[in-house]
Image: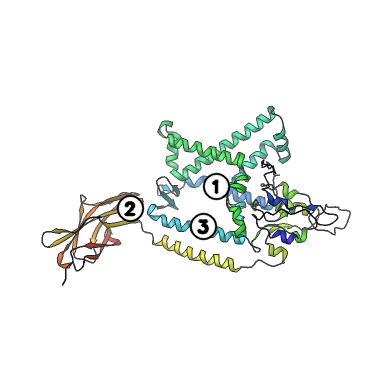
């Protein structure tokens, strides 16, 4: 029965009648699959007060979070040649990654990058489950490694937090709650400012903070909105973000299989459960039914029930279980990173056909993305014949076509460009311009005439090439067409 239950996917919640494991064991009730762990039968939220984890996985996550915070709070201040290292300016549609500026014309690179990211998430989940959620996701890192620790410091451990929540509003409760909420708000304010620095840049953020309020009403409004959202998420929504808002948990139902490595309870070794008695020889499973794995879970589930959409693979239950196993002199690893095949079939993790298929798609997309990044030029050039314009007859048996051009400078230096004919005899004249000076990080638009001898025109449309030169170096060739009269020879 247990093996069959383990194969239920997170969204397949089917109620079953309680079944007795044996005469000495409690009934195993599968009704947990009928509802989210943090909501009762009436739809009311069950507030989670997890115990503070302790163990090697929690320590590893703490060190990883320290590195994460250093990067998150310092990257907006790092500049390359006076410009941000990272900037995601959605408003102006300007993105800077590792000092390289990307414009709307480069959006297809980002589009492919997003597809690559989705495929990577799928592949990663197929192999390693929700490892991302427990170790890298900003929601988990900030909630468990910052806000939750502040809560432990101010309100005490889980038992003390429960008592405080049920207590009357006295001086002690008002002081502790106020101190926690003020701390949460201040931290949310810091996070929102940092987040905004990634959007508008640290220099613009400094102006918003330093200049008078009436000069940056929109900026202050954005800071206030972001601060309120972050405060609401970490003070009230908490695990609800993972269980009810984020779609990633529900994707487990189609991404996980028996070979996916997740935080799993070894039911083969742990069942049947029973309290530990040091005076007797243990003849049942190693699970001593201490519920420590449940008490430390930040989403309030019992990992012994199998894979569930609420599980974020944070490893808190692994640390708690290992600690108890060591205390009763039983082998650790009753809860560990493992797959269903590892546990039920005693098989090692294998690279399945599904994993190979995802990897192949991933490799193709990586090659394509790499090619686009390498072949990307520092200047975007568009030359198109002016719509609705026919050819014009000029003196000396010449014909002309009018074109519109747009030049986009993707660098931080001003560019001096000029056009020259490539595959035709003729000349190019700018309209109203003598020199093409494209400002750094900006664009330049205008019109030009292309002149050709009528004797060189053999077709109604003639393919021509225009060379774009910068400081004596040809940087690009633009293909267009020249419109002329049809002449039979």
Residue 70: mark: 1
Point 15% across, 67% down: residue: 455
Viewer-side residue, 347 vs 67: 347
Point 16% across, 70% down: residue: 488
CA gap between label 1 and label 3 equals: 24 Å
Horizontal side, residue 391 vs residue 23: left or right: left
Q: Residue furthest bottom?
A: 489
Tag in front: 2 or 3: 3
Viewer-side residue, 196 vs 109: 109
Identify the image quadrant of the C terminus. bottom left
Viewer-side residue, 449 vs 158: 449
Q: Residue furthest right?
A: 279
- At label 2, counting other C-alpha atoms closer than 10 Å, the crowd grade (few under 14, some 14-19, many 20 or more) is many
Q: Is residue 355 above or below residue 407?
A: below
CA gap between label 2 and label 1 equals: 35 Å
- Secondary structure at badge 1 equals helix
The residue under label 3 is: 117
Residue 481, image x, y percentages? 25, 62
Residue 252, image x, y percentages? 61, 57
Contact, CB < 8 Å: mark 2 with mark 3? Answer: no
Residue 228: mark: none
Residue 175, image x, y percentages? 65, 30
The residue under label 2 is: 408
- At label 1, counting other C-alpha atoms closer than 10 Å, the crowd grade (few under 14, some 14-19, many 20 or more) is few
């Amino acid at each position: 029965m247990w093996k069959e239950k383990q194969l239920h996917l997170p969204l397949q919640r089917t109620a079953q009648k309680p079944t007795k494991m044996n005469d000495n064991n409690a009934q195993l009730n599968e009704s947990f699959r009928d509802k989210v762990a943090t909501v009762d039968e009436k739809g009311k939220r069950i507030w989670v007060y997890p115990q503070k984890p302790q163990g090697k996985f929690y320590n590893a996550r703490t060190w990883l979070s320290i590195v994460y915070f250093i990067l998150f709070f310092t990257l907006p201040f790092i500049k390359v040649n006076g410009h941000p290292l990272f900037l995601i300016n959605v408003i102006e549609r300007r993105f800077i990654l590792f000092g390289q500026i990307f414009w709307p014309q480069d959006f297809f690179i980002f589009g492919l990058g997003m597809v690559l990211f989705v495929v990577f998430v799928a592949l990663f989940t197929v192999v390693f489950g929700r490892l991302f959620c427990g170790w890298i996701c900003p929601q988990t890192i900030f909630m468990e490694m910052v806000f939750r620790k502040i809560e432990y410091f101010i309100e005490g451990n889980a038992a003390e937090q429960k008592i405080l929540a049920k207590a009357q509003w006295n001086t002690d409760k008002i002081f502790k709650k106020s101190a926690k909420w003020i701390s949460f708000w201040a931290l949310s304010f810091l996070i929102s400012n940092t987040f905004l620095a990634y959007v508008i840049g640290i220099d613009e953020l400094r102006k918003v903070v330093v200049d008078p309020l009436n000069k940056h009403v929109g900026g202050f409004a954005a800071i206030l909105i972001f601060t309120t959202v972050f405060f609401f998420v970490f003070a009230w929504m908490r695990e609800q973000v993972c269980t009810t808002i984020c779609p990633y948990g529900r994707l487990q139902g189609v991404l996980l299989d028996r070979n996916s490595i997740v935080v799993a309870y070894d039911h083969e070794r742990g069942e049947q459960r029973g309290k530990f008695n040091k005076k007797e020889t243990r003849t049942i499973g190693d699970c001593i039914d201490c519920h420590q794995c449940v008490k430390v879970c930040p989403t309030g589930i019992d990992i012994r029930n199998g894979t569930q959409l609420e599980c974020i693979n944070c490893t808190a239950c692994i640390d708690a279980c290992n600690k108890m196993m060591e205390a009763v002199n039983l082998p650790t690893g009753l809860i560990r990173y493992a797959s269903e095949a590892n546990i039920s079939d005693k098989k090692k993790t294998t690279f399945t056909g599904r994993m190979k298929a995802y990897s192949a798609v991933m490799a193709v997309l990586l090659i394509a993305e790499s090619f686009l990044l390498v072949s990307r030029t520092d200047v975007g050039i568009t030359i198109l014949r002016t719509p609705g314009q026919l050819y014009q007859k000029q003196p000396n048996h010449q014909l002309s076509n009018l074109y519109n051009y747009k030049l986009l400078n993707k660098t931080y230096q001003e560019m001096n460009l000029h056009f020259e004919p490539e595959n035709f005899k003729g000349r190019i004249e700018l309209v109203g311009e003598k020199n093409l000076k494209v400002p750094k990080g900006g664009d330049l638009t205008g019109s030009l005439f292309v002149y050709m001898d009528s004797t060189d025109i053999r077709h109604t449309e003639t393919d021509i090439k225009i060379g774009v030169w910068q400081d004596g170096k040809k940087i690009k060739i633009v293909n267009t067409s020249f419109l002329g009269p049809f002449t039979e020879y």
